[in-house]
Amino acid sequence: MPRNRPTTADSSEPATLYLRLLGHMRAEDSAGRNMLPRTRKARAVLAVIALASPRPVLRLQLTALLWSQREKEQARASLRQAIHELQDTLSPPLSRLMVAERHHLALRIDGLWVDILDATRADVTQPDALDCFQSPLLEDLVGLDPAFDQWLVAERIRIIGIARGMGERMLADQGDSDSRLRIANQLVTIDPLHETAWRAIMRDHHDRGDPVAAMAAYDRCRVALSIADDARPSLETEDLAARIRSGPTVIATTDPEPTPDNSPPPRQERAGIDRPQRGGIRLGIAPLRPIGSAANEELSLGLAEEVTTALSRFRWISCISGASWAALSGEKRQEAMWAALDLDFVLDGTIQQTAERVRITVRLMDMRIAGAVIWAHRFDRETNDLLALQDEIGSAIVAQLDPALLIHEGERTAARHLNNPTTHELVLQALPPVYRLERQGFREAGRLLETAVAADPANAEAHAWLAYWHLFLVGQGWASDPPTIAVRAGDLAERAVTLDPADARALTLAGHVRSFLGKRAAEGCALHDRAIALNPNLALAWCFSGLAHSYLGRHDEALRRMYQAVRLSPSDPHLFFFDHALIMPHLLLAEYESAAEIGRRAIELNPWFSSAYKGYLAALGYLDRAPETEAVLNRLLELEPAFSVESAVARSPMTRPEDRARYAEGLRRAGLPERRNI
């Protein structure tokens, strides 16, 4: 810990708790006393909520990260024990920093100093701005749980991206050779595959009259790339090395700007090295590897082709079929095959089979970051009908891959701090904060989407997501002029469909805008049905379609469609929205217990989504549960202070008077004011 105690971000006063998360985790109070919890999982809980501070972290997320292989109740009990240990360790007055509520945990930022949060705010004009990043995040907490290890890999990648962006800005601003060399060396320590930094080291050594040191840097670069990606340096690096070998010459101090006569090679992104974007991703589908003599090779190949065909319906994913894969398999070893096919991601897995059951395990690997596994799932099924099994598992894989890839690419794109992002990259950056629904990040997402639409007025994807953003703006009660926003959302949605009538996601987003904001649910149903016909594995379309049917009073059909969305993608980032959608049909069928249970689940998944509280509150009004009702009502009015029975009915797209009446009566019984003037 530093001798001269740093202050918190919001105060000039010294902090009361100091956390080091880079390298081996450390925690001290202002007197230098050790405040680190005894058990590693309690330390991990503290680290996760510290990285998120001041935003809350769902208890559900913590149990999924640290006790993913335990039963739900056992995992919750383990989390409670870890929280108790934290509260004991952070004894008063430090325990005031920790906020432990029913559904989430958080750390207050006043009095808290965290090294990585402080480092990301560092002034890049300071020479020591990169010093903090020289050690990996939570070096001593690897191996706690497979889910935590995956989270840790993703967080390390995110932090490396931040450090890369800072280092690149520092490198570009430095005219002094010594400073430039020091920064470049720090960059390759943080990211050994950063060829721009390697070239800076080579140039500076050459300019100092030391070609031996320059070529030694080239050799280190070549070894780093070979170990991590089985690849060779780029053409720029090879060209620079050739000029250094050729003897005394003048070498440019920076990389040249790409021109028609000096363009970068097509494949330049190995584990974080930027390459020109194609507006989508290339995904290779490998046939499943049979384990054991009973494994069915036809099912393996058939499933790979089923997934390839289904994924081809997603506009932004380019699939490489099993046939292309097999054509190379006899000629090249696996890593070389991936390089030859120029893949961003690879989906592979295994198949095990007995006479009555089959187990299929699949994993998605990001080939740009040394094959890191970013998603995995296991399917255990009976083998009564192999063709039906192939259809079922293929649909589930496809439905879950699309949202997982969207969020992964969005977070990765945001972490890269691109200077001139493409329209597709702007959209990707906006998606994670749209899903999270935290007000500040949500506003920034809207800015990114507006920029994307302005940059490419013919882009259907950007128009569709901006329409959806406006829909949430109204649904959350954040719109200052809801009627005007509703018109804007409708115009954007219609434009998206006009630009690409075969884009299933644009169609279903437009359908939901028509149904919810335009109150034209029958028209919405037609668009949703068209989207499902184009892409039956798009879970979001099934959910939106169910909502439209519910608005029309067809609640049984609505539930069938909504539960299909959940079956297709049970871990979808939109799952909080799927659960919210399920509340209302159960409520309007007078199934109040089911509606309340789903409501609890929905707000656990996203406590910021105000719409989930509304149907939940109405169900509680009929169940007469005073303490729970009061808590939900208070939270809803925190999120939407102006919400009332009158505004709920006015905003509702339900077409049947009896449905609106049942909803309104539940809200009244729960204590929601009839009208509010705020």
Image (cartoon, grey):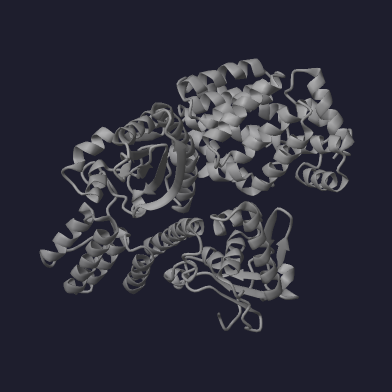
For the point 67% across and 25% down, the residue is 516
Identify the image quadrant of the C terminus. top right
Residue at position x 61%, y 70% in the image: 113
Q: Indicate left or right for 313 with 84 as reference.
A: left
**Left or right for 554, reference 153:** right
Q: Please state the total of marks drawn on the protein image.
A: 0
- The relative height of residue 519 versus residue 583 in the rendered view (above or below) is above
Q: Which residue lies furthest to the front in this view?
A: 355
**211 relative to 468, above or below:** below
Quadrant for the N terminus in the image: bottom right
Residue 141 in view here: yes
Q: In the orientation shown, which residue stands out farthest toward the left?
A: 246
Q: Which residue is drawn at 51% across and 22% down?
A: 531
- Location of residue 609 in the rendering, given as x and y in whole percent from the top left corner: 68, 42
Q: Is 394 placed above or below 19 here?
A: above
Residue 187 point in image, percent of width and height: 37, 65
**Image location of residue 590, percent across then percent down:** 79, 28
Q: Which of 78 and 270 is in front in this view?
A: 78
Q: Nearer the viewer, residue 677 or 395?
A: 395
Residue 583 location in percent, x, y? 71, 33
Task: Describe residue 273's horizontal placement relative to residue 517 as left or right.
Answer: left
Q: Which residue is drawn at 58% across and 69% down?
A: 43
Q: In this view, does 426 lie above or below 6?
A: above
Left-right relation of 351 to 455: left
* Residue 438 visible at all: no
